[in-house]
Amino acid sequence: MSNGFWDNLKRPIIGLAPMDGVTDPAFRYMVASTFNPSVMFTEFVNVEGLARGATKMIYGFFYSPKERPIVAQLFGTEVDSFYKAAVLLCYLGFDGIDINMGCPVSKVAGKGSGAALIKNPKLAKKIVKNVLKGIDDFANGISLENAGVHENIIKFIKENKNKFGGKDGIVSKNSDRKAIPLSVKTRIGHSEICAEAWAKTLIDSGVKILTMHGRTLKQLYSGEANWEVLGKVAKICKKGGVVFLGNGDVHSIDDAKEKIEKYGCDGVLIGRATNGNPWFFKGKEPSVKNRLSIIKKHVKYFEKLSYLPFQTLKKHLAWYTKGFEGAKEMRMEFMQAQSEKDIYRIIEEFSRKIS
């Protein structure tokens, strides 16, 4: 069975991991504009909210053509809602769908989703089955209405068609319909490590692309990612013909390649190392002047999106302004800014100082 675009990706795969509150459309656009990774993932979006017509959640699925291949990530617990979301994402032209079974934060795992699914394999299997059914039904021509997608969501996407990958986004003709690949991103365990058994459970349920973070839910992001365990899972996946990506504590492109080679992965997903560092995949630090130009471009694209609260931009600005003379002072000014206009002024003032 084909794994879709995954089969055509050049090895090793080095992609941008999904990060809540980070991999929004503006940041993904900046990554793609600087140096495209092998694959990108959206932030995770809650299936229950989508099923109940929460149109504001659709903003996370806006994407530009240059971000391809792009995978949309979902989280939740309601199997029927996963089905509806799967049909919707196929319609929006995504290259793949990913189920989050790895988020450790209490607002997600505490409600039974994310990494909590590691302790609920029965539900995890049902979710995978329903997403696969949604993908298959879409390929066979089901409409959004017949799939049970909320009328508010249908109306919203029809009014914002150009926000989903431009002319190559929304699938409008039955002849263009195709089954897209399903992947799962998870962790090596809940309280204890159970990575090998858990991977086998997911593979048996029909998962053909698997990403695993080298920490348990209990660890959150403390300690070090256990790549020895990830190496064992890589062997299981290789035997089963499953694409396997490791995740956790990858600090550079060279580090990524070394880990891929050492532990036998098909690739890695990079998360926190890209914060304020959309040029990560290029493997080369820009000059301060070029960094300022990148910040301006990020702010300009952020303005274009219009729906994102201004405060969400500030964490990116804080990450950008590190590691060069005057960065601390510039960062403090950014944190006091009230608008994009203020950001441009601060950049121009700093630019005059270094020119």
Image (tube, rainbow, N blue to C red):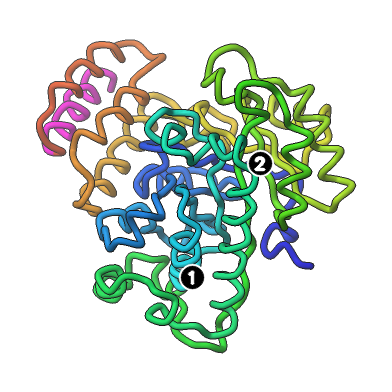
Magenta stretch containing residue 269, yes or no? no
**Residue beneath disc 1:** 87
Please, is residue 150 above or below residue 198 in the view? Answer: below
From which residue to which does the magenta span run?
A: 341-355
Q: Quadrant of the C terminus?
A: top left
Q: Which x, y percent locates residue 207?
A: 70, 54
Apparent side of residue 201 relative to residue 79 in the rendered image (left or right): right
Apparent side of residue 247 relative to residue 55 in the rendered image (left or right): right
Magenta stretch containing residue 343, yes or no? yes
Residue at image position (36%, 26%) is 320
Instruction: Bin the neighbour count of mark 1 within 10 Å (Cα to Cα): few under 14, some 14-19, many 20 and up.
Output: many
2 or 1: mark nearer the eye: 1
Q: Mark 1: which secondary structure?
A: helix
Q: Which x, y percent locates residue 108?
A: 42, 36
| Prevalent SS, magenta region | helix
Q: Quadrant of the N terminus?
A: bottom right
Q: Nearer the viewer, residue 264 or 99?
A: 99
Q: Which x, y percent locates residue 152?
A: 25, 70
Tag shown at residue 238: none
Instruction: Bin the neighbour count of mark 2 within 10 Å (Cα to Cα): few under 14, some 14-19, many 20 and up.
Output: many
Q: Nearer the viewer, residue 263 or 105?
A: 105
Apparent side of residue 76 relative to residue 119 in the rendered image (left or right): left
Tag shown at residue 211: 2
Q: Nearer the viewer, residue 47 or 345?
A: 47
Q: Which x, y percent locates residue 270?
A: 58, 34
What is the quadrant of residue 106 in the picture? top left
Badge 2 amino acid: Thr
Please, is residue 225 above or below residue 31 in the view? Answer: above
The Cα–Cα distance between marks 2 and 1, rounded to whole angstroms, is 22 Å
Badge 1 amino acid: Val
